[in-house]
Amino acid sequence: MTHQVHAFEPPERFVAGTVGPPGERTFFLQARGGGRLVSVSLEKVQVSLLAEKLEELLAEAQRRFGVKLPEPVTTVTGDNEPLDTPVDEEFRVGTLGLAFDVDTATVVIEAIAVGEAEVEVELGDADDDADDDADEDPDEPDDDLDRLRVRLTPEATREFIERAKRVVNAGRPPCPLCGQPLDPAGHLCPRHNGYHR
């Protein structure tokens, strides 16, 4: 069976976003460019880990290669618009890969579809690898899986990180006692022996 590689190098827009009310949100990565719109779904934890690992990748690129990085954003700026419509899921993300291309000073993000035997979320980074297709790696996901590949400047990467953090934190507020999300229909707090709060 053939697979598709949705490549945006660079995209006009690349964001993390959600569809649905808090507690029932579906998370997406969405890339737009060249008249194309690609949306892939993933877990909230994957969005959070992606933002965290991208920050680490930028810091490592600055340390090892002297890449000039933009300062972290302290105010809410940048892309705050909702996802572009229609939000049609191309595939569900199983693996996320990161690389820093030294030649072009860009970050490469690759979201790979869930394979039939895949059961866990992986997030790897190859920050000094200019070629993100490491075929000789035995842990590399199958080449017959669909994938979304975007190439971002450090500035665009920083904007993606800040938006991803806002999206993850925009869900249900945590319970002040147990830290679990508060459900509007009621919360059974283990710190209160299961009594409603």
Image (spheres, rainbow, N blue to C red):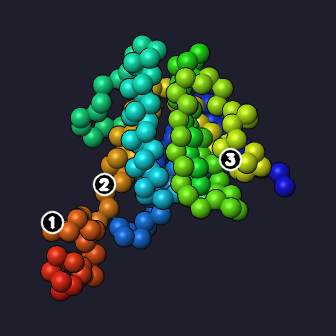
Crowding around mark 2 (Cα neighbors within 10 Å: few <14, some 14 to 19, many 20+) is: few
Q: Position of residue 19 (x, y in %)?
A: 46, 63
How crowded pointer 3 is (Cα within 10 Å; few <14, some 14-19, many 20+) is rated as: some
Q: Which residue is mark 2?
A: 169
Q: CA distance from mark 2 to mark 3?
A: 30 Å
Q: Is residue 139 above or below residue 10?
A: below
Position of residue 151 measured from the top left corner of the image (x, y, whole percent): 57, 31
Tell me the quadrant of the picture where the N terminus can be found.
Answer: bottom right
183 left or right of 80?
left
Dots 2, 1 in contact, CB < 8 A: no
Label 2 amino acid? Asn
> Which residue carries the number 1 mark?
176
Quadrant of residue 12 within the rendered picture: top right
On screen, residue 6 versus residue 122, left or right, reads right
Q: CA distance from mark 3 to mark 1?
A: 40 Å
| Comparing labels 2 and 1, the label whose residue is closer to the camera | 1
- Left or right: residue 167 versus residue 197 is right
Q: Amino acid at mark 1?
A: Pro
Q: Secondary structure at mark 2?
A: helix
Q: How many marks?
A: 3
* Amino acid type of the residue tagged 3 in the rendering: Pro
Could you tell me if residue 103 is visible in this image? yes
Q: Secondary structure at mark 1?
A: loop
- Cα distance in 3D space between marks 2 and 1: 15 Å
Q: Which residue is mark 3?
A: 141
Chain-order first, disc 2 or disc 3 = 3
- Tell me if residue 35 comes above or below residue 153 in the rendering: below
Query: What's the residue at 35%, 40% (across, down)?
Result: 162
